[in-house]
Image: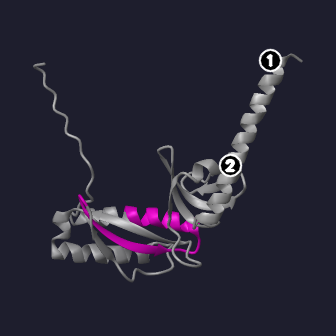
Amino acid sequence: MSAAIITLCVAVATFILQEGITNIIHGIIFRLFSNVHIGDRIEILIDGTTYTGSLSKITIRHVVINDFQTNAEIIIPNSKIDCSLIKNTYNGLDQHNRYIVELPVSYMDAENKEHSDYIKEVIKSSVVECPLTIDTVNDIYIAFKESYVGYTFFIKTNTIEENFRACSWIRENLMQELSKKDIHIPYSTLNVNINDNI
């Protein structure tokens, strides 16, 4: 075996070992200093992409997230997850299946007292009517955002998988019910002007 091949093999092995050791070190740091545990519902931003799911496994090399939308297992190296933005939506002990939902409403509609009361009633009735929820809405919180008023509330189900489906069901029902009163969920628009004289 020539010296060039031996050198190449040593370089490749060193690179592989370096990546492995990096993941192990980041894995230790992640376990010691992050407040994330198996079963937590998390949103994680990696290389510009956000993944949402439950954390199912933590090893010395990687973590595994069960993606809610695709039902796929996402394997993330520890070196990536330790340097990423993580949103942990776990809310207290034994509450993995409790999730907060925000309903955006235009300021024009929220300022109308009749509309505001109707929005709150629709939120409460939607949660009760959803076949997957196991609790009613006790409190609805209002926050002023840059381009809308956010009505936030909790949805609780038996399992975390049911919670994801319940959130989707309730959002769709809210959108349909609010449209009956001509109450708008704001969205971004883009106006394009074309100058034919150029």
Residue that appears at 22% across and 64% down: 183
Amino acid at pointer 1: Ala
Q: What stretch is highlighted in magenta?
A: 146-172
- Image position, residue 141 (x, y; %): 32, 76
Give how far apart the Cα atoms at labels 2 and 1 are. Answer: 29 Å
- Image position, residue 69 (x, y; %): 54, 54
Asked which secondary structure carries label 1, the reply is: helix
Compare marks 2 and 1 and give the one earlier in the sequence.
Answer: 1
- Image position, residue 59 (x, y; %): 72, 57
Q: Estimate how packed mark 2 is, as few (under 14), some (14 to 19) or many (20 or more) residues with alpha carbons within 10 Å.
A: many
Which numbered disc covers residue 17?
none
Quarter of the rendering containing residue 111: bottom left
Residue 86 visible in this rendered orientation of the protein: yes
Check the picture and name the quadrant holding the C terminus: top left
Q: Does the magenta stretch include residue 152?
A: yes
- Image side of residue 143 versus residue 173, left or right: left
Q: Estimate how packed mark 1 is, as few (under 14), some (14 to 19) or many (20 or more) residues with alpha carbons within 10 Å.
A: few
Spot the residue most to the bottom. 138
Residue highlighted by disc 1: 4
Check the picture and name the quadrant holding the N terminus: top right
- Image side of residue 80 versus residue 104, left or right: right
- Indicate how the structure is coloured in the image: one colour
Query: Which residue occupies the foreground of this view, 142 or 68?
Result: 142
Which numbered disc covers residue 23?
2
